Image: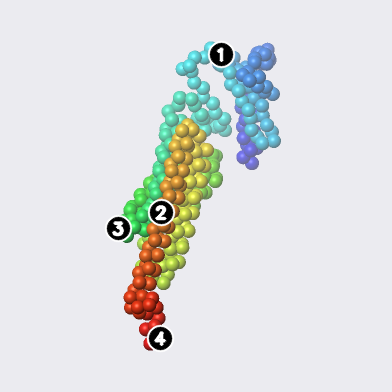
Amino acid sequence: MGKSLGALIFTGFLLFLSFFTSPSQAQTCNGLALPSNQVYSTCVDLPVLTAYLHWTFHQENSTADIAFRKTGTSPTNWVCWALNPSGGQTGAATAGGGASNSRLRKRNIHGVLNAVSWGILMPCGAMIARYVKVFHVANPAWFYLHVACQLSAYIIGVAGWGTGLKLGSDSVGIQYNKHRNIGITLFCFGTLQMFAMLLRPKPDHKYRVYWNFYHYAIGYATIALSITNIYEGFDILNPEKKWKSAYTGVIISLGVTALVWEAVTWLIVIKKKRAVGSADKYANGANGGNGYGDRTQQHA
């Protein structure tokens, strides 16, 4: 239904233009050479604008390739185009227009908020919880750092999610389903994690092991979806390549840091276990005189 309506509007628009051109004038656009020798199936002169419009309409998918050519232009000229079923500039695109700049600013704010919160702060908070808590000297500071980092990420992320909802409501007929669905899932996961902090059992509670599994699973899933959705956003916004490269560099740095700390913390844990085992063995040997004193006393 949507494609048929779009095709009808576009066809009517082209017919409307053709009514204001004479047969003799309509032939002049055929002799124009376009850049890259691009060929269009139809063209029409726009004498009032001293311009020419070329197009090829693809009936199979209701899309069109359009070329607009204007003579006597200067670098300060701009063009506005729109296809609307009613009057006004709803859905119009302009070069140099204030409304377009405002919308672009909102999209950039949306991208920055989400990249910083879900894409950077959230992974950093997870790394604090996994690696810093190994050091006894950091207890319980690591926990408060973890909570502060994740809570900040959630608050900023909700602000970014809200700007995304606003952008969606202002863009009637434009939908990025994958980006939107992942964003909704992230909001739900983040909210679940906030509630999980309120319902956290004590370390010695019998249900703590289930809570830990839930907390880790949702947390790592949130981080994976966050990074995926940020790259989806880059594809939608299509900013300068340096921004995507910068974020990729941040993610690679976090990944390398995580690998290094994973190795370091495992070494620390192994050394602690060996130290505890040696201490137990020494204590048993000291009590029994032969390294098996504890077992001998039990039999006695």
> Sequence order check: which comes first, mark 3 or mark 2?
3
Question: Whole-Å distance between the Cαs marked 4 and 1?
Answer: 106 Å
Would you name the residue on which mark 3 appears? 137
Question: Whole-Å distance between the Cαs marked 2 and 1?
Answer: 68 Å
Question: Whole-Å distance between the Cαs marked 3 and 2?
Answer: 16 Å
Would you name the residue on which mark 4 appears? 299
Q: Nearer the viewer, residue 81 or 137?
A: 137
Frontmost of labels 3 and 2 is: 2
**Dividing the picture into quarters, in which one does residue 14 lie?**
top right
Q: Residue at x 46, y 43 (%)?
A: 252
Q: Is residue 156 left or right of residue 72?
A: left
Name the kind of residue labelled 4 in the image. His
Quadrant where the C terminus is found in the figure: bottom left
**Dividing the picture into quarters, in which one does residue 104 lie?**
top left
Frontmost of labels 1 and 3 is: 3
Frontmost of labels 4 and 2 is: 4
